[in-house]
Structures are given as structure tokens and as C-alpha cells.
Amino acid sequence: MNIRPSCSSDPALRRLLEAQDAEYAEMYPPEINFTIPIEALRGPNLGVYVVEDQAQSIGCGAILSMEGFAEVKRLYIVPERRGRGFARRLMHHLEDAARAYGHTMVRLETGKQAPDAIQLYERLGYVRIGAFPPYVENDSSIFMEKAL
């Protein structure tokens, strides 16, 4: 497995995020889908990564440096490769990237319709919290954080 830096113009990243968007469109109506657009995945306060295994791009994720914390964005592993530890390893990589930005706290927002993701985050030490900016409390999201 390899985790490499990426950017919004990377065709592999675009394919992965389009697959994530299609999956999420089936799970969440647009008004409660808080993914950031592919075009927004750029800038000095954002690290974007692609996971490769056996010469295939199988997942991605990003870490966004905010004031006071880092936020995990767009974590995705293709369905046929889930359950093999790729997401866990990518999360560790994103946490290391957050540390490199100087953060001691990582937060994330996930949907209630993603029980496997919620279990992963809990196993990694994330705890549930209330909504944090720019989000507001809603019935479809779960907000979590982890001290690094």
C-alpha cells in the first residue's frame, strides 16, 4: 500500500471522488451532503492524498487545516477494498499530516447512514461532540474529534 499526495487535477483522485459522490447521492439528499467539491480541494491549508494498492488507486482523503483544529474531509475507500485496513492506515496518515500543520486536535463530520465509518472512527479514538463551525446541529450528522 502507498499513500501519495494528490491534487484536484489528478485523474485518479477525480475518479475516486466521483465514485464517492455517486455513493453519497444514494445515501444523503443534497441539503445534508456536506462533501466539499472536487474543485475546492486545493490550497496551502489542505493536504489531499490517494491510496494505492497493487498499482490501483483505491481510496483518498484530505486534511483541512482550520483555526484551532484540523478536519478530515472526503475519506473514501472503494467498496470492494473496504474492511482490509486501508481506511485505518489513511486516517493515521491524515492525523500525521494534521500534526505537521501544528494541530493537536482533529475533527470530522460523518453521516448517520455510515455505521462502518462511525465504528472505524470510534476504534481510532474519536469521540462524539456537538457541531463545530461551519456546521450546525442536524439530525443526519455525527460530529467527532480526537486529541492528537
Image: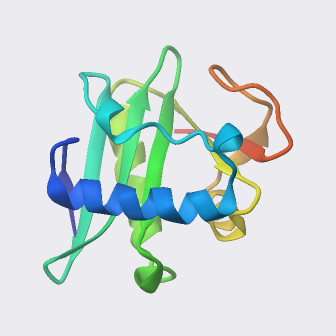
Which residue is drawn at the image coordinates 65% and 49% (left, top)?
110
Above or below residue 128? Residue 19 is below
Which residue is drawn at the image coordinates 51% and 82% (left, top)?
83
Q: Is residue 39 visible?
A: yes
Above or below residue 15? Residue 135 is above
Camera-side residue: 91 or 30? 30
Q: Quadrant of residue 13?
A: bottom left
In the figure, is residue 19 to the left or right of 15?
A: right
The x, y position of residue 45, in whole percent, is 31, 23
In the figure, is residue 132 to the left or right of 61?
A: right
- Residue found farthest to the right: 139
The x, y position of residue 88, in whole percent, is 47, 66
Which residue is drawn at the image coordinates 64% and 53% (left, top)?
125
Q: Is residue 144 visible?
A: no
Q: Quadrant of residue 62?
A: top left
Camera-side residue: 2 or 48? 48
- Residue found farthest to the top: 67
